[in-house]
Amino acid sequence: MKVVILAGGLGTRISEESHLKPKPMIEIGEKPILWHIMKYYSQFGFHDFVICLGYKQYVVKEFFADYFLHTSDVTFDLANNQMEVHNNYAEPWKVTLVDTGLLTMTGGRVKRIQPFIGDQPFMLTYGDGVCNVDLKKLLDFHKSHGKIATITTVNLSQLKGVLEIGDNNTITSFREKEEGDGSLINGGFMVLQPEIFHYLKDDSTVFEQEPMKRLAEEGQLKSFYHDGFWQCMDTQREMKKLEELWQSGKAPWKIWDK
């Protein structure tokens, strides 16, 4: 199953860092948060990634083009024009990097990668958040209910999409969160059937607005509640919080050895 990651936004709320690079490339523990997200998915056996790019897309492309330079020791033999990589660990990843437009909205970005997905279900998440959700249980839950979309829901005071949940974890409404709202929010880490593309019109489509509302109205949107760790990186304060967790050796999302 492919994992689609939204990594093309402008990152205006953390502009102190994102004026130099796209937000998913802001580093936690000297590695982009995008890398952390991919490492996490990989631990559950998801190795095939489609990354939706836009703002400063070349930074992401150069990172993967020169992956060993970022992750391994190297020896350059300048006289013979050779490079030797030492102790290189090759991630079992296939990474497709797609230019989905500079100002394209989230739904439009997903619509643009449809040719790389085809008629298969896929996972979708944002390129600026980490968690310790059990992805196997998430996928099993999605398969069990037969609806178009499952989103991981968390209960935090963030400015994210608010969900009202009825019987059998069916999401009955979706709206933007207001300050001080205590409702469950959209935490990303979604599983989607290919029918989702019918809900996406063009580059102006905001995934979290009309498509989500329609899915909820039609009973096609399910909630997978996660009461563990979840953290997005919208601000420098949140970036520092994630860095502190990483440096402490107790980052909840780090479930790999190397």
Image (tube, rainbow, N blue to C red):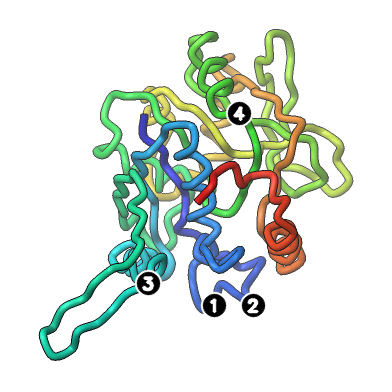
- Pointer 1 and pointer 2: residues touching (CB < 8 Å)? yes
- Residue furthest out toward the left: 80
* Residue type, numbered disc 2: Glu
- Pointer 4 and pointer 2: residues touching (CB < 8 Å)? no
Q: 243 left or right of 106?
A: right
Find residue 16 and name its label.
2
Whichever of labels 4 and 2 marks the residue nearer the N terminus, that label is: 2
Residue picked out by circle 3: 73
- Image point (28%, 79%), residue name: 75
Residue picked out by circle 4: 134
Q: Nearer the viewer, mark 1 or mark 3?
A: 3
Q: Position of residue 141 (x, y in %)?
A: 57, 15
> In front: 205, or 58?
58
Q: Residues within 10 Å of mark 2 (few under 14, many from 20)?
A: few
Q: Position of residue 60 (x, y in %)?
A: 39, 64
Q: Residues within 10 Å of mark 3 (few under 14, many from 20)?
A: few
Whichever of labels 1 and 4 marks the residue nearer the N terminus, that label is: 1
Q: Position of residue 39 (x, y in %)?
A: 49, 47
Find residue 19 and name its label.
1
Q: Residues within 10 Å of mark 1 (few under 14, many from 20)?
A: some
Disc 1 to disc 4, C-alpha distance: 33 Å
Disc 1 to disc 3, C-alpha distance: 29 Å
Q: 178 left or right of 239?
A: right
Q: Quadrant of residue 237?
A: bottom right
